[in-house]
Structure formats: C-alpha cells, structure tokens
Amino acid sequence: MGNLLNKRGSKKGAAHRFAYDGLDRVIHERARLSVLTSLVTHSKGLLFGDLKQLCALTDGNLNRHLQVLEAAKLIAITKSVQNNRPQTNCRITALGRKRYVEYLAVLEQVLLDVAAAVKSDQTAVGAFSHRGGSAES
C-alpha cells in the first residue's frame, strides 16, 4: 500500500505532502468513478441504459467514459441482440475491481491525512488563543 502514496512528504517537499500518486486519474474523474462504483456493486454487469440512468449521464458522455475505462482494461463491454434490440452490457474486470479497491484505500488515506492536519491546526490555533494571542497576527 505504501507504494501507492507519493513519497514527497519530507520536510524539503512539504508543499507536496498531500500529492497522492495512487489517486489514479482514469478512476478519479467523477463520471468514471460513478461508473465503476455502479459496476462494482453489480457483479453481472449493467446494461448501457441502466448505467446511464444510475450515473445521470448522456449517451455520448457515458460512451466516451466507457471507452476510456475499456482501454484501461478496467471494464469489459459485450454487445448482443435481444428481442431484435441491441444490448450493450458493461461489467467491471478483475483488474478494474483490484484498481478500484486500491484507489479507495488511497482515498481513505487522503481522508485520514486531512483529518489529522485539521486536528493539528485546530490544536495549534487553540493553544495560541489560550496564550492571549490573536489568530489574525
């Protein structure tokens, strides 16, 4: 897990201490995160129309995000015909599930780090104000 986090947290690179390499840009985009979250909870996959409705996307927008996810091998798309109507089924791949879980672990670390930083800042401000100083100084 440690290899997913950016190692720039040293004093020398403190300005970048919250840069997380594990926040995969392919997954991190809101619509693609929504697609993967929908698919990870439906192991048999979802039809294009159902996925479109769940993610509140247009046909063209969903199609473009599916292309990106498929190119990254995070999802598989199968096309068939049922009752003379084309059906497009999307499902998450084993690699997609693995990368999604890794992404969530890094996101969890981001939340923990921010919570610790906020708590530290609040403690510092509280200690400063108890000494009679002004936080505005």
Image (tube, rainbow, N blue to C red):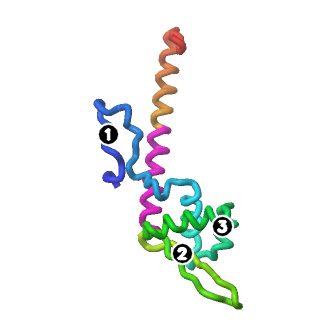
Tag in front: 2 or 3: 3
Which residue is disc 2 drawn over? 91
Circle 3: residue type: Asp
- Callout 3 crowding tier (Cα within 10 Å): few <14, some 14–19, many ≥20: few
Is residue 80 one of those drawn in magenta?
no
Q: Residue at x 67, y 63 (%)?
A: 58
- Where does residue 31 sit, x and y in percent of width and height? 58, 58
Q: What kind of element bears circle 3? A: helix
Look at the image and give the residue range highlighted in magenta. Answer: 96-115
Question: What is the distance, in whole Å, between disc 2 and disc 3 at their CAs?
Answer: 17 Å
Question: What is the distance, in whole Å, between disc 3 and disc 1 at their CAs?
Answer: 40 Å
Question: What is the distance, in whole Å, between disc 1 and disc 2 at their CAs?
Answer: 36 Å
Q: Taken as a whole, is the magenta stretch helix, strand or loop?
A: helix
Q: Which residue is drawn at 56% across and 64% down?
A: 64
Is residue 103 one of those drawn in magenta?
yes
Circles 1, 2 touching at the beta carbon (< 8 Å): no
Vertical placement of residue 1 versus 81, above or below: above
**Image quadrant for the N terminus?**
bottom left
Q: Which of marks 1 and 2 is nearer the N terminus?
A: 1
Q: Which mark is residue 8?
A: 1
- Where does residue 15 sit, x and y in percent of width and height? 38, 32
Circle 1: residue type: Arg
Vertical placement of residue 128 versus 68, above or below: above
Q: Earlier in the sequence, mark 3 or mark 1?
A: 1
